[in-house]
Amino acid sequence: MSARLLLIGPPGAGKGTQAQRLSEALGVPAISTGDIFRMHLRNETELGLKARAFMDAGDNVPDTLTNDLVSDRLSQPDAAAGFLLDGYPRTIDQVRALDEFLATHGASMDAVVELVAEPDVVVERLKKRALDQGRADDDEAVVRHRLDIYAQQTAPLIGVYAERGLLAKVDGIGEIAEVTERIESALAARGILFTA
Ligand code: ADP
């Protein structure tokens, strides 16, 4: 079925992991702005070169760059029937850009899933990921900065989507499969069905 969803939550809440699982279950592409930016870094594209300093410091990449990237991606045919956004929107300006994109395409969001996780838990998770994957922005000081940026710039979006009646709050602590089930039942309660 078609579903337009987004996952919101602090770094380390498990958005990427859950997005992969939900995308398979729903048959819609998972679109992670962080993954797309990392691909640009690896390939040393012009966008990658522009984004690198922001990412390494744990700051948001500027909105104009990010909004253009997402509007290109959402214009691809595989996103026409639905998508699951992970890590976007992250600022009020990005919400505005997404609203505009959707309005232009006669579409709207179906639900916003907030993955809830305490800062202490996510810092521990990201320390582990730093060892496993070696992401430069998983260094502890950078992680703490990313959490600050989340609290200042992204957490306010939760209220915006709650006011629109789109918010489903889900506890992100627990086994991966258990968290997926929580999300699926929160979405099912909103009429978003899983066929797989
Ligand atoms: P996390 O959610 O764990 O912080 P991501 O993979 O989503 O990690 O993002 C990594 C980095 O990519 C961010 O710190 C930021 O620099 C950049 N980035 C990702 N998504 C966005 C976005 N929507 N707006 C601005 N910058 C972004």
Image (cartoon, grey):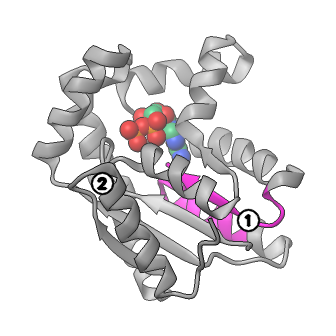
Inspect the image, locate mark 2, and give the three-letter code of the amino acid beneath it: Gln
Q: Can residue 60 be seen in this view?
A: no
Kindly give the residue lying farthest to the left in the view shown.
Answer: 120
Residue 94 covered by magenta stretch: yes
* Residue drawn at x 61%, y 55% as measured from the top left: 23
Secondary structure type for disc 1? loop
181 in relation to 107, above or below: above
Q: Considering the numbered disc 2 on the image, is that residue within a helix, a strand or a loop? A: helix
**Looking at the image, which residue is at 69% across and 52% down?**
29
Query: CB of residue at label 1: within 8 Å of ligand 1?
Result: no
Give the camera-side residue of 61 and 43.
Answer: 43
Q: Does the residue labelled 2 lie within 8 Å of ligand 1?
A: no
Figure check: 167 above or below 82: below
- Residue corresponding to mark 1: 82
Disc with the residue nearer the chain's start (2 vs 1):
1
Q: Distance between the residues labelled 2 and 1?
A: 29 Å
- Tell whether 13 sits left or right of 5: left
- Judge whether residue 69 is colored magenta: no
Over which residues does the magenta segment extend?
79-100
Quadrant containing the N terminus in the rendered view? bottom right
Image marks 2 and 1: residues in contact by CB distance under 8 Å: no
